[in-house]
Structures are given as C-alpha cells and as structure tokens.
Image: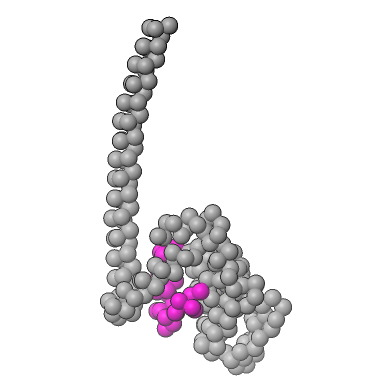
Amino acid sequence: AQNTGKDYDNLSNLAKKAGSALLAAFALDKIKDFTGEIIKTTATFQKFTAVLTNTLGSKSEAQKAMKQIADFAAQTPFGVEELTDSFVKLANAGFKPTTAEMRKLGDLASATGKSFDQLVEGLLDAQSFEFERLKEFGIKASQAGDKVSFTFKGVTTTVDKTNDAVRAYVLSLGDLQGVSGGMAAISKTLEGQLSNLEDT
C-alpha cells in the first residue's frame, strides 16, 4: 500500500509538471496566434483606410468613416470588412451613408435574412432602375413613365423615378414596424454575439 501510494504521488507530481508545461506551451501558442491576429487586423484596417482615403479624397474623412464603420460593426451582426466594402460601393455611387442610414439598411437586411452587402447591391441596381435584386427582399417594383411603384408587405408606394427618390424609399423601409430592430434581434443570437466579439 505504501509503495502504491508513493507511485501514485510520483505519477501525480509528473502529471502536474507535464500539465504546467502543456499549459505554458498552449498559452505561448495562443499568444502567437493573438499577436498574429493583431498584426493581420492592423494591416486590414490600414488597407481599409487607404481605400476610403482614395474614395473620399481625404485621410481625415477616411478615418472618420472607418471609426463610424467599426463602431457600427461592433454593435450589429455585420462585420467590418463587409460594411467597409458596402460603404465604399455606396460612396463611389455618390451616397455617403450616415450611421442612421446604415442602421436602416442593416435593419432591412436583417429583417429579411440577407447580408448588408446584398442589400447594398440591390439598392445600387435600383438606383439604375433595375429592380430584380430587390425581389430577394420582398420588394416588388413596376415602372410607368417617370414614376416607380414599390410594393412591400402588401403596401404600395409610388415615387418619382429618380436616384434620390428610390434610395429614400428603400431607406424608409428600415423604419417600418417588423423591420426596425432587426439587427438588434440577430445581435442577441449566438451568431450575432460572436460577430460582435470578433469585431471588438
């Protein structure tokens, strides 16, 4: 019994030493991974800032936009990369969305189970009076002369056939009951929380 006890103690001590070594190795490996992610994230943000500087024509404007996008991403189920790509597409089309306008687009995308980028692509097409992609969001459109009639959730709205009017209509959908708050609902899910954690 004494020999068995000594053997057990020796084995226990060996396991403790091995465990400490494994823990240290694991920690070192994770530190390397984390450091690598910091470098990768820094490089990605520098790239985004460079693209935004080129798009907006000013580094200070690009930095403001980057902060707006990063803050928005940290509170929504959408990632920084997707939002930056979408912001650049919109800015290149002459529309620099505010945080409130991004919230409307984000709620509409979330309420229909689509990505932010899909909605932006649909919006950009709609501003060229090509409405096929809006059907993915349950928005039907018909044109007659200088007017466009949209139907969403059984309600038809007619607007002028202009870029600004079409964009204003799509943005207005983000304030509707059953659409507004769509991002917040998804952000509470595990997927949304993981996305927010990653952005943070």
User: Closest to the observer: 76 or 139?
Assistant: 76
* Magenta stretch: helix, strand or loop mostly: helix
Q: How is the image coloured?
A: one colour
Residue 80: image location, x then y, percent: 41, 64
Quadrant for residue 44, please give it. Answer: bottom left
24 or 174, nearer to the observer: 24
Q: Is residue 87 magenta?
A: yes
Viewer-closest of 21 and 151 = 21
Looking at the picture, how far across and down is residue 12, in whole percent? 37, 20
- The correct choice, above or below, for 82 with respect to 2 in the image is below
Asked whether, in this view, residue 88 is left or right of residue 124, the answer is left
Instruction: Classify residue 14 as left or right of residue 174.
Output: left
Q: Which residue is depicted at the point 51% across and 88% down?
A: 164
Residue lying farthest to the right in this orientation: 154
Q: Position of residue 174 (x, y in %)?
A: 57, 76
The image quadrant where one finds the C terminus is bottom left
Q: Which residue is painted at 69% across and 75% down in the image?
A: 153
Asked if residue 54 can be seen in this view, the reply is no
Residue closest to the far front: 2
Boundaries of the magenta span:
79-103
Is 57 a magenta residue? no
- Image: 41 above or below 116: above
Q: In this picture, is 142 found above or below 69?
A: below
Residue appearing at x 33%, y 53% in the figure: 37
